[in-house]
Image: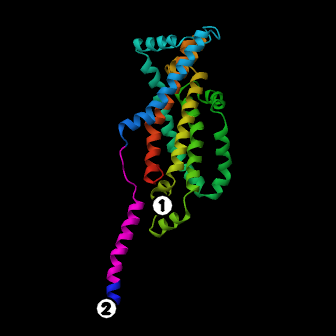
Amino acid sequence: MAGTETTRAAEPDLAGLEAGLDALDSVPERRTPVRQVLLGKVLPPVAAGALVLAVWKLLVLAGVTDDYKLPDPSAVWHSLRELWLNGTLLDIVWTSVSRGLLGFLAALALGTPLGLLVARVPVVRAALGPILSGLQSLPSVAWVPAAVIWLGITDAAMYAVILLGAVPSIANGLVSGIDQVPPLYLRAGRTMGATGARGARHVLLPAALPGYIAGLKQGWAFSWRSLMAAELIASSPDLGLGLGQYLENARTDSDMPGVLLGILLILFVGIAIDLMVFSPLERRVLRTRGLR
Protein backbone atom coordinates (compact mmCIF):
# COMPACT_ATOMS: atom_id res chain seq x y z
CA MET A 1 0.00 0.00 0.00
CA ALA A 2 2.78 2.41 0.88
CA GLY A 3 4.54 1.73 -2.41
CA THR A 4 1.32 2.39 -4.36
CA GLU A 5 0.73 5.67 -2.56
CA THR A 6 4.30 6.75 -3.22
CA THR A 7 3.90 5.94 -6.92
CA ARG A 8 0.64 7.91 -7.12
CA ALA A 9 2.26 10.87 -5.37
CA ALA A 10 5.17 10.84 -7.82
CA GLU A 11 2.92 10.84 -10.88
CA PRO A 12 1.92 14.55 -10.57
CA ASP A 13 5.59 15.47 -10.13
CA LEU A 14 6.52 13.61 -13.33
CA ALA A 15 3.64 15.23 -15.17
CA GLY A 16 4.77 18.66 -14.02
CA LEU A 17 8.35 17.91 -15.05
CA GLU A 18 7.21 16.84 -18.54
CA ALA A 19 5.09 19.97 -18.88
CA GLY A 20 8.06 22.09 -17.89
CA LEU A 21 10.32 20.41 -20.46
CA ASP A 22 7.69 20.89 -23.16
CA ALA A 23 7.49 24.58 -22.26
CA LEU A 24 11.24 24.90 -22.58
CA ASP A 25 11.23 23.20 -25.99
CA SER A 26 8.43 25.32 -27.39
CA VAL A 27 9.34 28.68 -28.92
CA PRO A 28 6.73 31.34 -28.09
CA GLU A 29 5.43 33.26 -31.08
CA ARG A 30 5.33 36.93 -30.16
CA ARG A 31 4.48 39.70 -32.57
CA THR A 32 6.93 42.59 -32.34
CA PRO A 33 5.19 45.93 -31.62
CA VAL A 34 5.15 48.40 -34.50
CA ARG A 35 6.88 51.06 -32.40
CA GLN A 36 9.73 48.67 -31.60
CA VAL A 37 10.09 47.77 -35.29
CA LEU A 38 10.23 51.44 -36.25
CA LEU A 39 12.82 52.26 -33.58
CA GLY A 40 14.97 49.16 -34.08
CA LYS A 41 14.73 48.46 -37.80
CA VAL A 42 13.59 51.58 -39.65
CA LEU A 43 15.06 54.51 -37.75
CA PRO A 44 18.77 53.44 -37.77
CA PRO A 45 19.12 53.10 -41.59
CA VAL A 46 17.07 56.27 -42.15
CA ALA A 47 19.30 58.17 -39.73
CA ALA A 48 22.42 56.75 -41.41
CA GLY A 49 21.13 57.81 -44.82
CA ALA A 50 20.34 61.32 -43.54
CA LEU A 51 23.85 61.55 -42.08
CA VAL A 52 25.41 60.56 -45.42
CA LEU A 53 23.33 63.19 -47.23
CA ALA A 54 24.32 65.84 -44.68
CA VAL A 55 28.03 65.05 -45.04
CA TRP A 56 27.63 65.01 -48.83
CA LYS A 57 25.96 68.43 -48.78
CA LEU A 58 28.64 69.85 -46.47
CA LEU A 59 31.39 68.63 -48.78
CA VAL A 60 29.68 70.30 -51.74
CA LEU A 61 29.26 73.56 -49.83
CA ALA A 62 32.89 73.43 -48.73
CA GLY A 63 33.99 73.08 -52.35
CA VAL A 64 36.36 70.21 -51.69
CA THR A 65 36.34 69.32 -55.41
CA ASP A 66 34.84 70.41 -58.71
CA ASP A 67 31.07 70.22 -59.23
CA TYR A 68 31.40 67.79 -62.12
CA LYS A 69 33.17 65.34 -59.79
CA LEU A 70 30.89 65.75 -56.77
CA PRO A 71 27.54 67.23 -57.78
CA ASP A 72 24.99 68.58 -55.32
CA PRO A 73 22.46 66.01 -54.00
CA SER A 74 19.73 68.11 -55.59
CA ALA A 75 21.25 67.39 -59.02
CA VAL A 76 20.95 63.65 -58.38
CA TRP A 77 17.38 64.18 -57.22
CA HIS A 78 16.67 66.10 -60.42
CA SER A 79 17.98 63.17 -62.49
CA LEU A 80 15.75 60.78 -60.55
CA ARG A 81 12.73 63.04 -61.00
CA GLU A 82 13.42 63.35 -64.71
CA LEU A 83 13.50 59.57 -65.14
CA TRP A 84 10.25 59.29 -63.20
CA LEU A 85 8.48 61.96 -65.24
CA ASN A 86 9.69 60.37 -68.47
CA GLY A 87 8.22 57.06 -67.35
CA THR A 88 11.52 55.20 -67.75
CA LEU A 89 12.59 54.74 -64.12
CA LEU A 90 10.51 51.64 -63.39
CA ASP A 91 11.35 50.14 -66.78
CA ILE A 92 15.09 50.52 -66.14
CA VAL A 93 14.85 48.99 -62.67
CA TRP A 94 12.54 46.15 -63.74
CA THR A 95 14.74 45.20 -66.71
CA SER A 96 17.62 44.45 -64.35
CA VAL A 97 15.56 43.07 -61.44
CA SER A 98 13.60 40.60 -63.61
CA ARG A 99 16.80 39.43 -65.29
CA GLY A 100 18.56 39.07 -61.94
CA LEU A 101 15.70 37.17 -60.28
CA LEU A 102 15.30 34.78 -63.21
CA GLY A 103 19.03 34.11 -63.25
CA PHE A 104 19.02 33.55 -59.49
CA LEU A 105 16.15 31.04 -59.73
CA ALA A 106 18.06 29.15 -62.41
CA ALA A 107 21.17 29.19 -60.19
CA LEU A 108 19.03 27.91 -57.30
CA ALA A 109 17.74 25.01 -59.42
CA LEU A 110 21.30 24.05 -60.40
CA GLY A 111 23.16 24.86 -57.17
CA THR A 112 20.89 22.93 -54.79
CA PRO A 113 21.27 19.43 -56.30
CA LEU A 114 24.94 20.15 -56.96
CA GLY A 115 25.45 21.05 -53.30
CA LEU A 116 23.66 17.88 -52.17
CA LEU A 117 25.81 15.79 -54.49
CA VAL A 118 29.07 17.38 -53.33
CA ALA A 119 28.10 17.12 -49.66
CA ARG A 120 27.03 13.46 -49.73
CA VAL A 121 29.36 11.82 -52.29
CA PRO A 122 33.02 11.87 -51.17
CA VAL A 123 34.45 11.30 -54.66
CA VAL A 124 32.42 14.18 -56.10
CA ARG A 125 33.44 16.37 -53.18
CA ALA A 126 37.12 15.63 -53.73
CA ALA A 127 36.77 16.40 -57.44
CA LEU A 128 34.43 19.42 -57.44
CA GLY A 129 34.88 20.94 -53.98
CA PRO A 130 38.09 22.85 -54.78
CA ILE A 131 36.69 23.93 -58.16
CA LEU A 132 33.55 25.39 -56.54
CA SER A 133 35.65 27.25 -53.99
CA GLY A 134 37.87 28.61 -56.76
CA LEU A 135 34.89 29.70 -58.86
CA GLN A 136 33.40 31.45 -55.84
CA SER A 137 36.55 33.50 -55.36
CA LEU A 138 36.81 34.38 -59.07
CA PRO A 139 35.47 37.87 -59.85
CA SER A 140 32.28 37.64 -61.90
CA VAL A 141 33.47 40.32 -64.31
CA ALA A 142 36.15 37.89 -65.54
CA TRP A 143 33.43 35.75 -67.14
CA VAL A 144 31.90 38.58 -69.18
CA PRO A 145 34.40 38.56 -72.11
CA ALA A 146 34.18 34.78 -72.42
CA ALA A 147 30.38 34.78 -72.24
CA VAL A 148 30.17 37.47 -74.93
CA ILE A 149 32.48 35.51 -77.25
CA TRP A 150 30.56 32.27 -76.65
CA LEU A 151 27.01 33.61 -76.75
CA GLY A 152 27.24 37.12 -78.18
CA ILE A 153 25.80 40.25 -76.57
CA THR A 154 22.52 38.56 -75.68
CA ASP A 155 20.42 37.72 -72.65
CA ALA A 156 21.99 34.26 -72.72
CA ALA A 157 25.40 35.79 -72.00
CA MET A 158 23.90 37.71 -69.05
CA TYR A 159 22.38 34.56 -67.58
CA ALA A 160 25.59 32.61 -68.11
CA VAL A 161 27.53 35.17 -66.09
CA ILE A 162 24.89 35.07 -63.34
CA LEU A 163 24.99 31.28 -63.16
CA LEU A 164 28.78 31.14 -63.04
CA GLY A 165 28.76 33.65 -60.20
CA ALA A 166 25.83 32.36 -58.13
CA VAL A 167 25.85 28.56 -58.45
CA PRO A 168 29.14 28.04 -56.53
CA SER A 169 27.92 30.24 -53.64
CA ILE A 170 24.60 28.39 -53.33
CA ALA A 171 26.25 24.97 -53.57
CA ASN A 172 28.97 25.84 -51.04
CA GLY A 173 26.38 27.28 -48.64
CA LEU A 174 24.38 24.06 -48.76
CA VAL A 175 27.53 21.97 -48.31
CA SER A 176 28.47 24.02 -45.25
CA GLY A 177 24.98 23.61 -43.80
CA ILE A 178 24.95 19.84 -44.36
CA ASP A 179 28.39 19.50 -42.77
CA GLN A 180 26.92 20.95 -39.56
CA VAL A 181 23.98 18.51 -39.40
CA PRO A 182 24.43 16.16 -36.39
CA PRO A 183 24.91 12.53 -37.53
CA LEU A 184 22.17 11.51 -35.08
CA TYR A 185 19.59 13.21 -37.32
CA LEU A 186 20.68 11.14 -40.30
CA ARG A 187 20.59 7.87 -38.32
CA ALA A 188 17.14 8.72 -36.98
CA GLY A 189 15.95 9.49 -40.50
CA ARG A 190 17.25 6.19 -41.84
CA THR A 191 15.55 4.35 -38.97
CA MET A 192 12.22 5.89 -39.99
CA GLY A 193 12.77 5.05 -43.64
CA ALA A 194 13.92 8.50 -44.84
CA THR A 195 16.67 7.49 -47.24
CA GLY A 196 17.81 8.78 -50.61
CA ALA A 197 15.68 11.63 -51.97
CA ARG A 198 13.24 11.39 -49.06
CA GLY A 199 16.07 11.71 -46.57
CA ALA A 200 17.43 14.74 -48.40
CA ARG A 201 14.01 16.39 -48.48
CA HIS A 202 12.81 15.60 -44.96
CA VAL A 203 16.08 15.46 -42.97
CA LEU A 204 19.10 17.00 -44.69
CA LEU A 205 17.59 20.18 -46.15
CA PRO A 206 15.53 21.16 -43.06
CA ALA A 207 18.49 20.55 -40.75
CA ALA A 208 20.87 22.46 -43.03
CA LEU A 209 18.54 25.46 -43.53
CA PRO A 210 20.63 28.11 -41.68
CA GLY A 211 23.73 27.44 -43.77
CA TYR A 212 21.64 26.99 -46.91
CA ILE A 213 19.92 30.37 -46.46
CA ALA A 214 23.30 32.02 -45.88
CA GLY A 215 24.39 30.51 -49.19
CA LEU A 216 21.22 31.80 -50.86
CA LYS A 217 21.89 35.33 -49.60
CA GLN A 218 25.42 35.17 -50.90
CA GLY A 219 24.17 33.64 -54.15
CA TRP A 220 21.78 36.55 -54.67
CA ALA A 221 24.59 39.03 -53.95
CA PHE A 222 26.76 37.30 -56.56
CA SER A 223 23.84 37.20 -59.03
CA TRP A 224 23.24 40.93 -58.70
CA ARG A 225 26.93 41.83 -58.90
CA SER A 226 27.46 39.53 -61.88
CA LEU A 227 24.51 41.03 -63.72
CA MET A 228 25.67 44.60 -63.11
CA ALA A 229 29.16 43.72 -64.38
CA ALA A 230 27.69 42.10 -67.48
CA GLU A 231 25.38 45.05 -68.20
CA LEU A 232 28.23 47.52 -67.76
CA ILE A 233 30.56 45.77 -70.17
CA ALA A 234 28.23 44.08 -72.67
CA SER A 235 25.76 46.90 -73.20
CA SER A 236 23.55 46.81 -76.28
CA PRO A 237 20.24 48.41 -77.30
CA ASP A 238 18.94 44.92 -78.07
CA LEU A 239 19.18 44.01 -74.38
CA GLY A 240 16.99 46.84 -73.16
CA LEU A 241 18.07 49.62 -70.81
CA GLY A 242 18.96 48.17 -67.42
CA LEU A 243 20.69 49.74 -64.45
CA GLY A 244 24.16 48.68 -65.55
CA GLN A 245 23.71 50.06 -69.06
CA TYR A 246 22.16 53.25 -67.65
CA LEU A 247 25.25 53.69 -65.48
CA GLU A 248 27.55 53.13 -68.46
CA ASN A 249 25.57 55.58 -70.60
CA ALA A 250 25.86 58.22 -67.88
CA ARG A 251 29.62 57.66 -67.71
CA THR A 252 29.90 58.01 -71.49
CA ASP A 253 27.99 61.29 -71.34
CA SER A 254 30.09 62.53 -68.38
CA ASP A 255 26.82 62.83 -66.46
CA MET A 256 28.03 62.56 -62.86
CA PRO A 257 24.56 63.01 -61.29
CA GLY A 258 23.38 60.15 -63.51
CA VAL A 259 26.37 58.03 -62.46
CA LEU A 260 25.64 58.58 -58.78
CA LEU A 261 21.95 57.92 -59.36
CA GLY A 262 22.75 54.61 -61.08
CA ILE A 263 24.99 53.58 -58.18
CA LEU A 264 22.31 54.48 -55.63
CA LEU A 265 19.60 52.59 -57.54
CA ILE A 266 21.78 49.46 -57.76
CA LEU A 267 22.48 49.72 -54.04
CA PHE A 268 18.82 50.29 -53.24
CA VAL A 269 17.65 47.23 -55.18
CA GLY A 270 20.22 44.98 -53.53
CA ILE A 271 19.24 46.17 -50.06
CA ALA A 272 15.50 45.97 -50.81
CA ILE A 273 15.67 42.36 -52.02
CA ASP A 274 17.65 41.37 -48.94
CA LEU A 275 15.25 43.11 -46.54
CA MET A 276 12.08 41.86 -48.22
CA VAL A 277 13.10 38.27 -48.98
CA PHE A 278 16.19 36.89 -47.29
CA SER A 279 16.22 38.66 -43.91
CA PRO A 280 12.62 37.66 -43.00
CA LEU A 281 13.31 34.09 -44.14
CA GLU A 282 16.48 33.95 -42.08
CA ARG A 283 14.73 35.36 -38.99
CA ARG A 284 11.93 32.84 -39.31
CA VAL A 285 14.30 29.87 -39.57
CA LEU A 286 16.38 31.04 -36.62
CA ARG A 287 13.24 31.76 -34.57
CA THR A 288 11.89 28.25 -35.11
CA ARG A 289 15.17 26.95 -33.74
CA GLY A 290 15.02 29.19 -30.69
CA LEU A 291 18.04 31.22 -31.81
CA ARG A 292 16.18 34.57 -31.91
Q: Is residue 184 above or below residue 116?
A: below
Q: Residue 145 lies in what quarter of the image?
A: top right
Q: Give the structural element (helix, strand or loop) at label 2.
A: loop
Which residue has dot 1 on it? 199
Task: Give the amino acid at mark 2.
Answer: Met
Give the residue at x 49% y 26%. 47
Give the residue at x 54% y 44%. 214
Q: Is residue 241 visible?
A: yes
User: Which percent across, then down, holds residue 13?
Assistant: 36, 74
Which residue has dot 2 on it? 1
User: Which percent across, then down, holds residue 207?
Assistant: 49, 56
Q: Residue 244 lies in what quarter of the image?
A: top right
User: Which percent across, then down, holds residue 234?
Assistant: 59, 22
**Magenta extent:** 7-31
Name the quadrant of the N terminus.
bottom left
Q: Is residue 259 above or below residue 143?
A: above
Position of 204 compared to 123: left or right? left
Task: Give the amino acid at mark 1.
Answer: Gly
Q: Give the structural element (helix, strand or loop) at label 1.
A: helix
Give the residue at x 48% y 39%. 105
Q: Is residue 253 visible?
A: no
